[in-house]
Image (cartoon, rainbow, N blue to C red):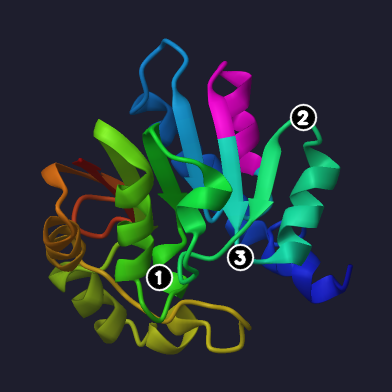
């Protein structure tokens, strides 16, 4: 396992570890107390999947990186991890269907075709199931603040292989989810002050 994979999947990356600590409690707060069936879509190092399983939920975790999945299996051997991409035909056959929740934490901003992630999530949810998507927040006030502070070079992190390539506002991600067929879209800003949130959580019902 090379050092780049170790860093990309968050075992040595402080920023990614902080994001996990920030977002996971809010994600858990979106879930019912009773056990439900969950797909962790873009599971990375498996930290979220482990937190979900610890709450008693039935978890399937999937990532496109075989190396990343191997890392997650080593750290959390009691969880079902699968290697699959949302771009592949047969995605549902690999991970299964009829999930109560699909959760994708800080993944969609890394994809050239982000609608594919929402399409895949929608396809494996049971009717009435919900998808939870988190991504860095971008809105007018935050973008203005970054511009005034000269912070775009640092924010874009162009020296990070596999970094962010799409940047979403509440409006753009909501539109993507509505186009896919989701309804009852919910929003929550996470971290920092209102309008300058670090990330956002959107939820949609099938």
Asked whether residue 57 is drawn in magenta, I would say yes
- Looking at the rendered image, the quarter that the N terminus falls into is bottom right
User: Between 108 and 155, which is closer to the camera in this rendering?
Assistant: 108
Q: Residues within 10 Å of mark 1 (few under 14, many from 20)?
A: some
Report which residue position mark 1 lands on. Answer: 109
| Residue 23 at least partly seen | yes
Residue farthest right in this picture: 1
Residue at point 26%, 69% (across, down): 168
Q: What secondary structure is marked by label 1?
A: helix
Name the residue furthest top.
Answer: 34
- Give 29 or 97, whichever is nearer the viewer: 97
Above or below for 149 versus 117: below
Q: Find out whether residue 103 is within the magenta segment.
A: no
Label 2 – label 1 distance at C-alpha: 29 Å
Please report contact status of discs 1 and 3: CB closer than 8 Å, yes or no.
no
**Foreground label between 1 and 3:** 3
Label 3 environment density (alpha carbons within 10 Å; few <14, some 14–19, many ≥20): some
Q: Please indicate whether residue 102 sits to the left or right of residue 202 in the image.
A: right
Q: In the structure shown, which secondary structural element does the residue marked by tag 3 occupy?
A: loop
* The magenta segment: 47-59
How many neighbours does mark 2 have within 10 angstroms: few (below 14), some (14-19), or many (20 or more)? few
Residue named by callout 2: 78
Which numbered marker is on residue 20?
A: none
Q: Secondary structure at mark 2?
A: loop
State the residue position of label 3: 64
Q: CA distance from mark 1 to mark 3?
A: 15 Å
What residue is rendered at 29% in x and 69% in y? 115
- Of labels 2 and 1, earlier in sequence is 2
The residues bearing labels 2 and 3 have C-alpha atoms spaced at a distance of: 20 Å
The answer to whether 44 appears left or right of 179 in the picture is: right
Q: Position of residue 49 (x, y in %)?
A: 60, 37
């Amino acid at each position: 396992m090379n050092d780049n994979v170790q860093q990309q999947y968050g075992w040595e990356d402080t920023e990614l570890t902080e994001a996990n600590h920030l977002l996971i409690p809010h994600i858990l707060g979106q879930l019912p107390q009773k056990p439900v069936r969950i797909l962790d879509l873009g599971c990375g190092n498996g930290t979220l999947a482990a937190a979900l399983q610890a709450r008693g939920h039935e978890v399937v975790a999937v990532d496109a990186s075989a190396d990343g999945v191997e890392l997650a299996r080593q750290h959390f051997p009691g969880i079902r991890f699968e290697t699959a991409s949302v771009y592949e035909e047969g995605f549902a056959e690999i991970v299964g269907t009829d999930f109560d929740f699909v959760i994708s934490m800080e993944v969609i901003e890394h994809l050239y075709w982000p609608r594919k992630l929402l399409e895949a999530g929608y396809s494996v949810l049971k009717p009435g199931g919900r998808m939870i998507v988190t991504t860095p927040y971008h809105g007018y006030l935050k973008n203005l603040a970054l511009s005034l502070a000269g912070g775009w070079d640092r924010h874009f992190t162009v020296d990070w292989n596999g970094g962010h390539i799409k940047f979403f506002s509440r409006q753009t991600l909501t539109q993507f989810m509505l186009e896919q067929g989701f309804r009852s879209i919910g929003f929550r800003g996470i971290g920092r002050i209102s309008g300058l949130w670090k990330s956002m959580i959107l939820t949609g019902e099938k």
